[in-house]
């Protein structure tokens, strides 16, 4: 006899159907259920964002202190250059002209107070280097400048004086070339405008005892500084071919350059005692 079941028979337990395949999981559901892919996606987004931002990353501007220092250096350099130009172009002229004017007055006063011996005053070699002994006048240029022995830069030319080339002729010599040099720019610039001289213009040299008048006869617009032929008794490059009594003016050219020399030639046309000079 079977055990008591309450008079009823129990239904048999259902058996699973083996032919039914399980539903495949969707990708979203799979990724959602897995934490690793989500972390990788977030990492890629951050990396891409950094790469996009890198090219546009701003550099730090220079510090204000460095900018101020650079500006100060530029301003200081500019001021130094301006001061140098002012000194060379303006102040040296002021100083040199003052010295030349003083030398001119001193010469004229000396000639008045102490009449010289005409036999010795104009002999070659009679003067020390830097010693004034004559006055150059060029009416066409309004020039009146003392002439000193020698052409030393500091001793003569930078003082605004006209220098006599030692060893060349003197005005009183029976023949020869009285050769002179002076600055064209800065330091008084006595020969600034001698390029304006034309044939026939007068060049007057006064000494303690006489006045010598020359006429411009020619020029060389530019010759090398090494061309000493212009200092010969019959100056090279001049219109003169025989011995005579000549004057040669030399200065730098072009202006504000020492590249070459401008030369002006003149020939004596009159000599008279200084007492008759107007």
Image (tube, rainbow, N blue to C red):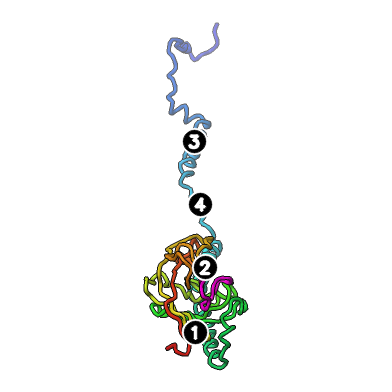
Instruction: Pick the quarter of the image with the C terminus.
Output: bottom left
Q: Does residue 10 show up?
A: no
Q: Distance between the residues labelled 2 and 1?
A: 21 Å
Q: Residue 44 carries which label?
A: 3
Percent x, y for residue 220?
43, 64
Percent x, y for residue 188?
49, 76
Is tag 1's residue or tag 4's residue first in the polypeptide sequence?
4
Instruction: Pick the quarter of the image with the N terminus.
Output: top right
> In this view of the protein, which residue sits in the foreground, 136 or 216?
216
Q: How far apart are marks 3 and 2 (CA)?
A: 98 Å
Is tag 4's residue or tag 3's residue first in the polypeptide sequence?
3
Q: Is mark 3 on a helix, strand or loop?
A: helix
Left or right of 145, for residue 216: left
> In this view of the protein, which residue sits in the foreground, 46 or 107?
107
Q: Mark 1 against mark 3, which lies toward the viewer?
A: 1
Q: Distance between the residues labelled 1 and 3?
A: 106 Å
Q: Do the residues labelled 1 and 4 touch (CB within 8 Å)?
A: no
Q: Distance between the residues labelled 1 and 4?
A: 82 Å
Provide the residue designation for mark 1: 210
Query: Furthest residue to the top?
Result: 1
Provide the residue designation for mark 4: 59
At 47% from the left edge and 90% from the top edge, which residue is drawn?
Answer: 275
Left or right of 150, for residue 238: left
At 51% from the left edge and 75% from the top edge, which residue is drawn?
Answer: 174
Provide the residue designation for mark 2: 233
């Amino acid at each position: 006899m079977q055990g008591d079941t309450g008079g009823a028979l129990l239904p048999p337990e259902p058996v699973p159907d083996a032919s039914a395949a399980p539903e495949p999981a969707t990708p979203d559901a799979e990724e959602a259920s897995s934490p690793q892919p989500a972390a990788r996606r977030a990492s890629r987004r951050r990396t891409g964002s950094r790469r996009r931002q890198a090219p546009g990353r701003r550099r730090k501007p220079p510090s204000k202190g460095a900018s101020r220092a650079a500006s100060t250096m530029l301003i200081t350099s500019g001021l130094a250059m301006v001061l140098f130009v002012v000194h060379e172009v303006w102040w040296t002229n002021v100083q040199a002209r003052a010295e030349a004017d003083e030398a001119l007055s001193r010469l004229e006063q000396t000639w008045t107070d102490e009449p010289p011996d005409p036999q010795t005053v104009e002999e070659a070699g009679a003067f020390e280097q830097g010693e004034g002994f004559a006055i150059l006048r060029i009416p066409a240029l309004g020039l009146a400048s003392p002439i000193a022995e020698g052409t030393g830069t500091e001793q003569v030319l930078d003082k605004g004086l006209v220098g006599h080339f030692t060893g060349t002729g003197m005005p009183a010599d029976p023949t020869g070339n009285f050769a002179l040099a002076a600055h064209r720019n800065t330091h008084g610039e006595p020969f600034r405008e001698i390029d304006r001289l034309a044939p026939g213009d007068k060049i007057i040299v006064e000494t303690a005892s006489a006045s010598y008048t020359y006429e411009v006869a020619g020029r060389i617009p530019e010759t090398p500084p090494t061309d000493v032929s212009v200092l010969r008794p019959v100056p090279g490059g001049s219109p003169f071919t025989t011995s005579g009594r000549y004057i040669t003016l030399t200065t730098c050219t072009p202006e504000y350059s020492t590249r070459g020399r401008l030369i002006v030639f003149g020939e004596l046309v009159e000599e008279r005692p200084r007492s008759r000079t107007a």
